[in-house]
Image (cartoon, rainbow, N blue to C red):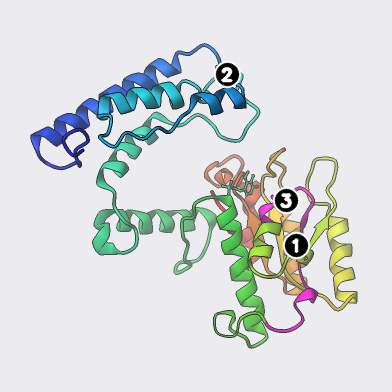
Amino acid sequence: MSKLNPILAASAHSTEAYQQAIAQSSQAVVQWLQQPEMYQGKTVAELRERITLDFNPQGLGNQAAIERAVEYFLKDSLSVHHPQCVAHLHCPSLVISQAAEVLINATNQSMDSWDQSPSATIIEMKLIEWLRTQVGYQPGDAGVFTSGGTQSNLMGLMLARDAFFARQGHSVQQDGLVGNLTKIKVLCSENAHFSVQKNMALMGLGYQSVTLVKTDYFGRLDFNDLSEKVAQAQANGEQILAIVATAGTTDAGAIDPLRAIATLAAQHQIWVHVDAAWGGALLLSEKYRDYLGWYRIGGFHYSGLP
Ligand SMILES: Cc1ncc(COP(=O)(O)O)c(C=O)c1O
């Protein structure tokens, strides 16, 4: 096996195999990019029939394995770079990110601790620090990279939950969830990503904890309905754990009225989490960053950047 598929190391055999495999793969990608169709058109049933996982105990060898991956995976992949591929969220990737993947995969660093990834750990910390200044957070404010929007929303909601219980003198880590949990609510618009519900369920508070606020003609959270729902919740003796605003809804890219939401939340001492998985990159645009400029209003929580 190791002769056919050597571990990446300094030996001549390994580095030669590495260079061949990378050259063969990138050549295959270049050919795939020329395919005229966005998708080759196979049905689910055809793909199920065609893709077989017949494992070979001897291994195929790198060249044959790559040929097989090209045949079964690459050729029937969706061409996200195709001009007609506009219906989904995932975009074509940058050339430089291909180079980054090569370096990342070859080095296989672990971000668990500094001794497992000396330079990458420092790069991560500096990037977080740079992002902090882009958002406008104060020095000392921390951040973390997540795997995507669902995890960012989970992180934001967990922070909101922990702060909520801490205000009542409980540590969630120590005590778990205490009190009448059915009275705890999170408010978000009907167009917020479904991971809000999913994460509330994961955190033990259930789908029932999410109150949906109406949206306006542009798909943004309707501020009047939010104000009414906050008042209603208070009249019902409910406690609002957080308002989740969306900066860029999944289907339309609509940005909720962040400043108004932040002002209302400040009046009622409610935590705001902004899901900026979609629109967060506007922070890097001089022209459009003010769409997200609400954080200047004061001590709120802006998370869920991509
Ligand atoms: C606004 C928004 N939030 C969260 C998510 C979830 O992101 P992910 O699929 O990376 O978990 C999405 C994904 O489409 C999204 O559009």
Residue 199 lies, with reference to residue 191, above or below; the image says: below
**Alpha-carbon neighbours of circle 2 within 10 Å: few (<14), some, or many (≥20)?**
few
Label 1 with label 3: CB-CB less than 8 Å: no
Near-viewer residue (22 or 235): 22
Q: Number of numbered discs present?
A: 3
How far across and down, in percent of the image, does residue 133 sit? 47, 57
Q: What amino acid is at disc 2?
A: Pro
Name the residue rendered at 58%, 19% in the picture.
42
- In the picture, measured across the screen, residue 152 lies left or right of residue 127, that is right
Q: Give the answer, above or below, for where 193 lies relative to 186.
A: above
Q: Is 287 placed above or below 129 here?
A: above
Q: Residue 153: x percent and y percent?
A: 61, 58
- Comparing labels 1 and 3, the label whose residue is closer to the camera: 1
Q: Amino acid at mark 3?
A: Ala
Q: Which residue is mark 2?
A: 83
Residue 301 appears in the picture as rendered:
no
The tag on residue 192 is: 3
| Disc 2 residue: CB within 8 Å of ligand 1 | no
Helix, strand or loop under label 2: loop
Q: In the displayed structure, does residue 2 sit left or right of residue 287?
A: left
Determine if the C-beta at disc 3 is less than 8 A from ligand 1: yes
**Which range is magenta?**
178-196
Residue drawn at the location 55% of the way across and 84% of the way down: 174
